[in-house]
Amino acid sequence: MNDILKQIIELKTDEQIEYFIINKTFLLELSSEEKTVGQNYTDSFRDYISKKIHFKPSPDFEEGKCPDLIYDDLEPYFNLIKLIKQNNCHDITHLLLLINITIYEYFNPNSIKSKKDLIIARYTTYLSNKDKSLSIKIIKKNGIAVCSEISGLAHNMFKFLGIDSEFVCGSLNDEYHAYNFIYPNGYDSEPTILIDSTNFFDYTLEKNEYEQFISGKPLTINSKNNLTYIFGLKNVNTYLESKGITK
């Protein structure tokens, strides 16, 4: 991470920034392998979401497969690099804030005010592209990004910056939710930070919290809203059933 941040700070022109982004994303694409991940497919995954990855941000529709979401827009990376340079960012805490700001400004997640309208717009967009692929640019244009699309972009940004990241399909407060773990010192090394870019939130897990969390026990974070996270879809289903909630 530090080496990449140093390289970013030294970039001088927009052309240099664009070349840097293209080169980094090309190398990430080159090293990826084809697989299917996402809602109802995996509890979590650590792969860069390349064009080879069949990333499913929602469960399948009755009428067909959920389309693969493709992160094919360089704009958020360009905007993030600009913020990093402007703020002379060198530490993880500052970087997390800049990533959350970049994602929020890119997706403008509150552009559709009504939850019902958002659900309809998402369903219509994904259904009209069933059994196909769908560009993240369409998600942005239609203003329908929620946790899966947001956490997917955060995940790719972490990987782009050389930070080990994990995308998690879990739950938050009894509702399906996607979020991230990051491992600043390498996968499975302390500390582990839970990142919820949808809610502009991050929390550093103690070792015992992390071990209990990935075993399936709820993690309640004492905040103004007392957020309760669950790790993994299998554990989510069990937990929701114990609450008498069916999905």
Image (cartoon, rainbow, N blue to C red):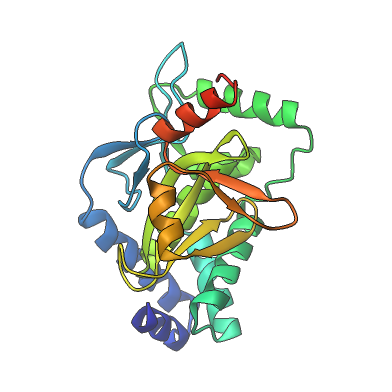
Horizontal side of 227 relative to 37 (left or right) equals right
- Asked which quadrant contains residue 142, the reply is top right
Residue at image location 60% in from the left, 83% down from the top: 87
Residue 121 at x, y percent in the picture: 65, 28
Residue 16 at x, y percent in the picture: 41, 78
Residue 27 at x, y percent in the picture: 25, 62
Q: Which of 69 and 95 is in front in this view?
A: 95
Residue furthest right as drawn: 113
Quadrant, the N terminus: bottom left
Residue at image location 28% in from the left, 59% down from the top: 28
Q: Which of 201 and 99 is in front in this view?
A: 201
- Asked which quadrant contains residue 174, the reply is top right
Q: For residue 58, say whether it is visible.
A: no
Residue at image location 44% in from the left, 61% down from the top: 157
Asked if 23 appears above or below 57 in the picture, the reply is below
Q: Nearer the viewer, residue 229 or 69?
A: 229
Residue 141 at x, y percent in the picture: 62, 42
Q: How many marks?
A: 0
Asked if 23 appears above or below 61 in the picture, the reply is below
